[in-house]
Amino acid sequence: MQTIADKTLDVTLLEPRMKHPTIFQYFDELPEGAALTIHNDHDPKPLYYQLLGERGNVFTWEYLEQGPVWWKVKITKRVSGEMDETLGQLVAKDFRKAQLFKKYGLDFCCGGKKTLKEACLEKGLEVTRIEQELQQADQLPAGSNALPYNDWSPAFLADFIVNTHHSYVRKNLPDIVAYADKVSKVHGGRHPELLEVWKLVEEVNQEMMAHLVKEEKVVFPYIHELSAAKDRKESALAAEFGTVQQPINMMEMEHEVVGQQLASIRELTNNFTLPEDACASYSLLYRMLDDFENDLHLHVHLENNILFPKALSIEKKLN
């Protein structure tokens, strides 16, 4: 058997009753930041959940080899104080991960402050599988259309959001409201869920139109002032609301409300599945709603996970 100093362990050489106790012993004796690699003849996934349950979120788990004959897993002990990044932070660093989270219905924008483990636990998802897919995504080339959002100044990003996503909302939401009303009146008798969809669309419309004004009249102008003060190496200007954290809290709450409303629409429509008697307007409504939700996810992600943290960081440094 290898020594603890080797930081490797061939589990197949151990008696079955000694496997997990020995792995725990090896792990407990690791210094922070060090790793233990285990070799096994089957997937040691049950060990992942036992280690998580008994030691907590103090390790990372990486498959180096995964069958069909041998499994090799690298278990790294976290450095004290080091925590998992949230879904929002993961996507902020690499937007390719957004597609994977969408695939599993994991909210990286409105509810993006959860860690992957927390989000998977809520959804009843297998976290080891999704972690592995994230590791594989890291090996893919970045998309040619990826924009360097993280590199932009807060002022530039705020202007981009207004010119791109606020404009999209103002252009498309009135049409969605009109089609939701029309389709519910024509098909609501046979498909009563459309009446609920129409009510939710009306609520989204009222919430979003007021929300855009607050951002454009209050939050974004102050973020511009913060950026200018940073460039001039001046102190932050005093604002009526005190710290920018106050309006940010309100914006994030409103993001969550709209996100929940759109999630309810998706559930009511069974992921925008059209019935056999759907007309062209019915089909168009579902397509517009799907597109609107996708745009909102990016819109809210840019604010919650990139713009607002940048603004808070600048304000803290200036005060």
Image (cartoon, helix red, strand yellow):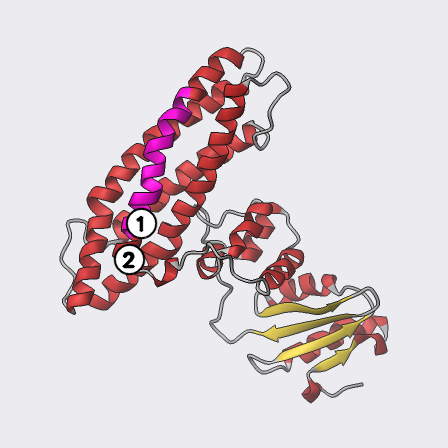
Please give the name of the residue rendered at 70% of the width and 77% of the height, measured from the top-left corner: 37
Residue 13 lies left or right of residue 32; in this view the side is right
Give the quadrant of the C terminus. bottom left
3D distance between C-alphas at marks 1 and 2: 10 Å
Q: Position of residue 38 (x, y in %)?
A: 73, 75
Residue under label 2: 154
Dot 1: element:
helix
Q: Position of residue 274 (x, y in %)?
A: 60, 24
Q: Which secondary structure class fits the magenta region best?
A: helix
Q: Pick out the residue farthest to the front.
A: 144
Q: Is residue 11 above or below residue 242?
A: below
Q: Is residue 264 above or below residue 317?
A: above
Q: Is residue 162 magenta?
A: yes
Residue under label 1: 160
Q: Which residues are magenta?
A: 158-178
Residue 109 lies left or right of residue 78; in this view the side is left
Residue 282 lies left or right of residue 218; in this view the side is right
Please give the name of the residue rendered at 59% of the width and 46% of the height, measured from the top-left corner: 103
The amino acid at mark 2 is Pro
Q: Is residue 41 above or below residue 198?
A: below
Q: Nearer the viewer, mark 1 or mark 2?
A: 1
